[in-house]
Image: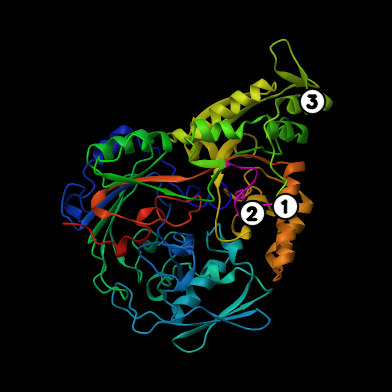
Amino acid sequence: MTARSIRGAAAATLATVLLSTATACSQPGGPDGGGSASGAADSAVVGIAYEPDSLSPLLGYGKDGNSKIFDGLLTLDDGMKLRPALATALPEVSDDRLTYTYRLRKGVKFSDGEPFGAKDVVFTYRTILDEKTNNASRTELDAVKSVEAAGDDTVVFTLKYPYAPFAQRTVLPIAPEHIAGGQDVNTGEFTTRPIGTGPYLLTKWSKGEKIAFKANPGYWGGAPKVKKFTMAIIKDDDVRATRLRSGELDGAILPPNLAKGFARGSGTRTYAATTYDYRNVTLPTHNKVTGDIAVRRALDVAVDRKAMVDSLLNGEGRPAYGPVPTDSEWFTKGTERPHDLAAAKKILDDAGWKPGKDGIRTRDGVRAAFPLWYLTGDKLRQDHALAYASDAKKAGIDITTEAGTWEVIEPRMKQDAVLAGGGSPADPDFDQYALLKSSLAGDGFNNMAWYDNKAVDRALESGRRSGDSAERKAAYDTVQRELVKNPGYTFLTHIDHLYVVKDRFGPLTTQVEPHDHGLASGPWWNVEDWTPKK
């Protein structure tokens, strides 16, 4: 996982789902009201790979939208355009771009019947900004100077600087002060039994197994037609595909090689969502091998990204040269790094890394070898790790791949490389700041590589604080060019997400997706609007 997140995966549960768990979850609907794939027409059961650590937006749940239980002031449509949710319109922005005023929807109630109002918005943002709150994404609201209620139905945000994408931050879900305000924000009951204004109510969360919802009959946007919705937590890709094929699931996210096994005419449809989701390898600065810039640069050109897209993704993706996809307006042309094994060898030769009798290089008694961890059960990460290790060995670098849960991996991240992931389509600041800012090194899954580049730090601050689009583009151009000179990560691929869903729910739509997928994204991003066929 990465910075943001690891944003999703960073928030992912740390327990491995074993086959026994999958068997226990084979009827995710059950008597608790979660729905069943083979049951009522107004129910849906989908298979996802990860679950959150908490269901509290105060701790980061649903911060990018689509939380099901909650609503934000704004939301994103299928074209990723902002539209009102708990606000009646997009915010009124002052000429100096330092004040954002939101008018709130009247008559909205939380699912316990209590009214929603400006005090809940103020409570939510102030709590997240409180240093005592364990929210790893607090820096995303760094621009906020104050948030105040102006009556019951108006909220005013005052910023420290003209943060260009601030409105996109206000898709963040709103928590009820009357419930969450009376509990310990980090450990209280609200973290697992939340109350919100959203289209669904939580009926049961069996950690490592499922999250079950039922439609909110009093939802301000109209009661959903899918009355029971269950997310089955199945970390193993193969198990998820098997259960979808057997009819235990109505839909699932699958890696490309498994999704292609569901042919047309099988009663399912496959949906491909374009994404900003990348896979990369962290190269920790505290490791004697990966901390050497020559090794980083050599690995950056030794890797065959196109071969990974073709063979691992079946063409469902693109080579990645940094956090920004090559087809984005924010991508810096000329920073592409073609596969060049000869150049990789020369970089290592010039830096004094000489091949030994076994072909593995050494310098000053240090062998060019290091472990690379990937998440157990994630076949796509495993495949990327093995391909990366194979490419590296051709250049004389010995990488040993290791599988583990995040509980095993996280304590090792300062020294050991990790096959990680990240990406956000909203704005360059959303992903790059947490991924690369030196001050965030060691802060959970932020800056996992402990990357420290002062030019990048300055550019990140400029991109965050400037309200001028040209200045912001120049700042993020600087970041991408610096990653060519000193790559703290080897970026491998940007991955299209593939979902297979039963025909009776289609045709469906997808959004441009971040790294976090399945839980908040996917064809069920707007399940509250589905009309199932009888």
- Residue 68, quarter of picture: bottom left
Residue 432 is marked as 2
Instruction: Note whether residue 112 is visible.
Output: yes
Residue 152, image x, y percentages: 44, 87
The residue segment tinted magenta is 319-332
Which quadrant of the rendered structure holds the C terminus? bottom left
Instruction: Please give the residue where the numbered disc 3 appears in the rendered image.
Output: 346
- Residue 212, quarter of picture: bottom left
Instruction: Please give the residue where the numbered disc 1 appears in the rendered image.
Output: 479
- Verify whether residue 320 appears in magenta: yes
Residue 471 higher or lower than 73, as above or below: above
**In the rendered structure, are the residues bearing label 1 and label 2 in contact, judged by CB atoms less than 8 Å apart?**
yes
Tell me the kind of residue under disc 3. Lys
Tell me the kind of residue under disc 2. Gln
Q: CA distance from mark 3 to mark 2?
A: 30 Å
What type of secondary structure mainly makes up the magenta span? loop
Say what secondary structure mark 1 lies in.
Answer: helix
